[in-house]
Image: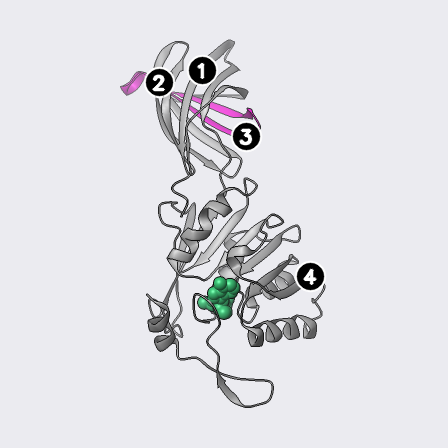
Amino acid sequence: MNRARWAWIAGLITIGASGVARAQEGVGDVVYVPTPQIVVDTMLNMAKVNAKDYIIDLGSGDGRIVITAAKKFGARGFGVDLDEVLLKRANDTAKREGIADRARFVEENLFETDLSKATVITTYLLPEMNEKLRPKILRLKPGTRVVAHDYHMGEWQPDDNDTLSVPEKSVGNPGTSYIYLWYVPANAAGKWQIRAPVGGHTLAVDLDLSQRFQMLSGNARIDDRAAQLQGARVRGEDVTFWLTVGSGASAVRHEFNGRLQGDTINGTLRVHAGKKVDQAVFTAKRTAPGKLDLGSSL
Ligand SMILES: C[S@@+](CC[C@H](N)C(=O)[O-])C[C@H]1O[C@@H](n2cnc3c(N)ncnc32)[C@H](O)[C@@H]1O
């Protein structure tokens, strides 16, 4: 939906500090439409925001997302906007709520904002704006969460999503809010060697992974037998995949869950053979880099 149409639908009128009614439309690439409070709370809960988090809201409007993150979740951070009236309102609210030391609002173009301190980024922007921000977001520290209201990130599929019924919402899809959550994925692409002691035997796994955003695909061998790779993905630094050898009643399924740091994955392996389940720790070492596809940079 383009800016003019959204503005027309929104038709927001706010009362300024002077008590004079004025149209408050926001400034820049998208009009001002506030995220309903129930949606703000759900976005922050989905991202598991906590007191260790540093949150940045890109296009912060009246500041409600960062203010809620600071007040209810103990986080700190800032919002950027180009609308001086909204920025003043946001900073005044933060002061009134006694959290101005943890929530501040600055005049800045959101495409130029330094995101390096963020552990959580929030947006309620148009999809093409999210997509323009995407390459910059994908270069952030793995595990950084991004939560967007209503609009997606193009080819980068969300790690989680929710749909809320919001009867008072009159823009976008009236009465409904969509929430999307992504984790900046670590780079797990490459050739990996895994050695894991399971049931008195050292399992030898060779894995060759390609990565597109958070999704992994490739080939695997276990003890020199071809294995089927399934459910392979990265969520921040957490890597999950299943390898199955054999088929039917003799199939043996290996479930790997680990944490990737640099060229090492440490984690837990569960081997399911019929009703028998063995558990072991495993270490994977990357022996060669692989193909990492983070989409086109717009
Ligand atoms: C849809 S509102 C979202 C407000 C708030 N994040 C929320 O969810 O309640 C989008 C905001 O982005 C601001 N904005 C638009 N283009 C911008 C830009 N290039 N840089 C900074 N802010 C911008 C507008 O002024 C508006 O306040």
Disc 3 marks which amino acid?
A: Leu
Residue drawn at 41 percent across, 55 percent down = 162
* 165 lies above or below 122: below
Circle 2 packing at 10 Å, graded few (<14), some (14-19), many (20+), is: many
Give the x, y percent position of residue 30. Answer: 43, 67
Disc 3: residue Cβ within 8 A of ligand 1's nearest atom: no
Q: Earlier in the sequence, mark 4 or mark 1?
A: 4
- Residue on which the image places disc 3: 260
Cβ atoms at labels 2 and 1 below 8 Å apart: yes
Label 4: which secondary element: loop
Q: Earlier in the sequence, mark 2 or mark 4?
A: 4
* 48 lies above or below 167: above
Q: Residue furthest left?
A: 248
Disc 4 marks which amino acid?
A: Arg
Give the x, y percent position of residue 250. Answer: 31, 16
| Residues rendered magenta in the picture | 244-273
Q: Residue 282: say if magenta.
A: no
Q: Residue 249: say if magenta.
A: yes
Label 2: which secondary element: strand
Cβ atoms at labels 3 and 2 below 8 Å apart: no
Label 1: which secondary element: strand
Label 3: which secondary element: strand
Disc 1 marks which amino acid?
A: Val
- Residue on which the image places disc 4: 102
Q: Earlier in the sequence, mark 4 or mark 3?
A: 4
Q: Nearer the viewer, mark 3 or mark 1?
A: 3
- Residue on which the image places disc 1: 205
* 142 lies above or below 95: above
Give the x, y percent position of residue 276. Answer: 42, 20
Number of marks present in the image shown = 4
Disc 2: residue Cβ within 8 A of ligand 1's nearest atom: no
